[in-house]
Every structure is written in C-alpha cells, then in structure tokens.
Amino acid sequence: MKKIIVSGLIVGCILFIVSYGGLFLAIRLVPSLFIEYNNPLFKSDGSRDVLFYLHAFIISFALSWFWDRFKGMFKGWFVVRGLEFGLVYSLIALLPVMWISFSSLDITVTMVVSWFVYGLFQAVVAGTVFAKINP
C-alpha cells in the first residue's frame, strides 16, 4: 500500500506540473480549440474549481493502484512498459468515456480527440514513471 501511495504522490506532482504546463502551451499553439470552450456547458461558478486542480492526483492514485495490480503483465524496457500501460488504460477506460461524452454532450469531435490524446499522454507519463520507480 505504501508503494501505491508514494508512487501516486510522485506521479501526481509530475502530472500536475506537466498538465498545467501543457495546458498553457496548448492554449498558445492551438487557440482555436479553446474557443470551443466558450459554451454554457463549461461555465462554472467557481465553487468546484479545487476538484479540477486535484485531477492530477486523483488519476495518479487510480493509475498507481492499476499499475501495482497489473505491472507484471507489462514486459520490456521501462519506456515500452509505460507506453503499453498508457495504451491499455486508454482503450479500457478513456475510449468508452469519450464515446459516451461525445454521444451525450454538445461537444465537438476535436474536443473529444484532444481529451483522449491528453488522457493517453497522462497515462503514458504515469506508466513510464511507475515502471522506473516501482518495477
């Protein structure tokens, strides 16, 4: 349990930094995508903003448990293990969530694809770090 918590905290910090750095970079590189967020669906009163900022830690603890449970199934160099981990997570969890999100919300294909790529990137980073610190 200690490995799961420690790994989760380390990856949570890394994902927090990478995710928010990536967000600011993406806004600069692809501003047209973020114009799509001027939609009433994404308006917030600010009362739950802390939940948004905790996302990196929530996903890191979930992925840490997933890694600890199934790490023996991923073979090879730590980067390959991290990539495979990210792909497995993306196909099992992200793809169905993106499908239901697109089918039930007024969002564009571009938004869904960007969320999928973002989630895949997070999972690959997490898996690579897990493979290195908790082989």
Image (tube, helix red, strand yellow):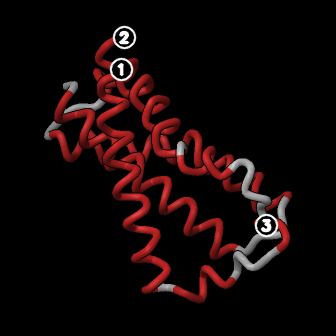
**Contact? badges 2 and 3 (CB < 8 Å):** no
Q: Answer with mark 2 or mark 3, whichever residue precedes in sequence.
A: 2
Q: Neighbour class for label 2 at 10 Å: few (<14), some, many (≥20)?
A: few
Residue 51, percent from left and from top = 63, 44
- The residue positioned 19% from the left and 25% from the top of the image is 135
To which residue does mark 3 refer? Answer: 43
**Contact? badges 1 and 2 (CB < 8 Å):** yes
Which residue reaches farthest top? 1
User: As displayed, is residue 52 above or below residue 126?
Assistant: below
Residue 79, percent from left and from top = 20, 46
Residue 1, percent from left and from top = 37, 11
The amino acid type of the residue labelled 3 equals Lys
| Secondary structure type for disc 2 | loop
**Contact? badges 1 and 3 (CB < 8 Å):** no
Per the rendering, the mark at residue 1 is: 2
Residue 21, percent from left and from top = 37, 66
User: As displayed, is residue 52 above or below residue 26?
Assistant: above
Determine the image quadrant of residue 78.
Answer: top left
As measured in the structure, the alpha-carbon distance from the residue carrying label 1 to the one carrying label 2 is 5 Å
Asked if residue 81 lies left or right of residue 78, the reply is: right
Q: Answer with mark 1 or mark 3, whichever residue precedes in sequence.
A: 1
As measured in the structure, the alpha-carbon distance from the residue carrying label 1 to the one carrying label 3 is 35 Å
**17 or 88, which is in the foreground?**
17
To which residue does mark 1 refer? Answer: 4
As measured in the structure, the alpha-carbon distance from the residue carrying label 2 to the one carrying label 3 is 38 Å
The amino acid type of the residue labelled 1 equals Ile
The amino acid type of the residue labelled 2 equals Met
- The residue positioned 70% from the left and 75% from the top of the image is 37
Front label number (2 vs 3):
3
- The residue positioned 76% from the left and 66% from the top of the image is 42
Q: Neighbour class for label 3 at 10 Å: few (<14), some, many (≥20)?
A: few
